[in-house]
């Protein structure tokens, strides 16, 4: 990783803390924000998106579900949240999924983003989730472009 792609690490001690980090990001997202979520099953990706939805005033956390079988859920608030889940796909065609229909104006949360070639995503905030205990998680935020660097700056994660 280069200085052009800054990163920051956060450790959460509970599902609520993971959700709260999502809320913090949702509160400062701008149109076109792409959150590329990586991590194993149960690592906290959907929990994090619940917080993003809350931060966007798009949905109550309990109303946000993983779109594993429908592939995408939409939530409307300050900005539209397009929540994609690629878990069940062997081959990913972003255009067929409707990804580009929302790329410029919505906030996109893309679960299982590792199934897509990173260069196809453009500017995005890569968030890797690691299970570190029964309720604890390690979240690595990595900026992948100018807008995502600005998003990290607004989160005040750097010393």
Image (cartoon, rainbow, N blue to C red):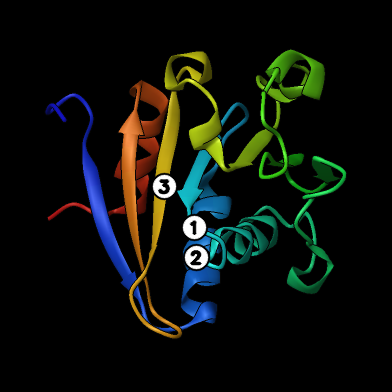
Q: Name the spot of residue 131 as percent of width and height, x first.
A: 39, 70
Q: Name the spot of residue 22 as percent of width and height, x first.
A: 53, 60
At 54% across and 80% down in the image, what residue appears? 16
Relative to the observer, which residue lies in front, 148 or 86? 86
Q: Name the spot of residue 148 as percent of width and height, x first.
A: 39, 32
At 30% across and 42% down in the image, what residue appears? 153
- Left or right side of 45 for 70: right
**Where does the N terminus fall, quadrant-wise?**
top left
Dot 2 falls on a residue whose secondary structure is: loop
Q: Earlier in the sequence, mark 3 or mark 1?
A: 1
Q: Read off the residue under disc 3.
A: 127
Task: Bin the neighbour count of mark 2 within 10 Å (Cα to Cα): few under 14, some 14-19, many 20 and up.
Answer: many
- State the CA–CA distance, disc 3 to disc 2: 11 Å
Dot 1 falls on a residue whose secondary structure is: loop
At 77% across and 50% down in the image, what residue appears? 68
Task: Bin the neighbour count of mark 1 within 10 Å (Cα to Cα): few under 14, some 14-19, many 20 and up.
Answer: few
Relative to the observer, which residue lies in front, 11 or 117? 117
Q: Are marks 1 and 2 in contact (CB under 8 Å)?
A: yes
Q: Read off the residue under disc 2.
A: 43
Considering every residue shown, the one lying at the far right of the view is 70
- State the CA–CA distance, disc 1 to disc 2: 5 Å
- The relative height of residue 45 versus residue 125 in the rendered view (above or below) is below
Q: Read off the residue under disc 1.
A: 40
- Left or right side of 113 for 127: left
**Where does the C terminus fall, quadrant-wise?**
bottom left
Q: Give the mark toward the camera: 1 or 2.
A: 1
Q: Earlier in the sequence, mark 3 or mark 2?
A: 2
At 69% across and 56% down in the image, what residue appears? 53
- Left or right side of 76 for 32: left
Image quadrant assignment for residue 105: top right
Q: What is the number of callouts on the image?
A: 3
């Amino acid at each position: 990783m280069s200085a052009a792609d800054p990163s920051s690490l956060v450790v959460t001690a509970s599902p609520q803390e993971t959700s709260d980090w999502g809320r913090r990001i949702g509160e400062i997202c701008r149109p076109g924000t792409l959150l590329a979520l990586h991590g194993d099953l149960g690592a906290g990706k959907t929990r994090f998106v619940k917080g993003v939805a809350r931060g966007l005033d798009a949905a109550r956390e309990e109303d946000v579900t993983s779109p594993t079988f429908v592939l995408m859920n939409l939530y409307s608030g300050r900005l539209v949240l397009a929540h994609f889940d690629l878990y069940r796909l062997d081959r990913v065609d972003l255009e067929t999924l409707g990804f580009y229909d929302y790329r410029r104006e919505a906030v996109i949360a893309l679960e299982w983003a590792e199934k897509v070639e990173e260069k196809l995503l453009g500017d995005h905030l890569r968030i890797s989730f690691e299970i570190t205990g029964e309720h604890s998680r390690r979240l690595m935020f990595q900026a992948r472009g100018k807008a995502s660097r600005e998003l990290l700056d607004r989160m005040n994660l750097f010393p």
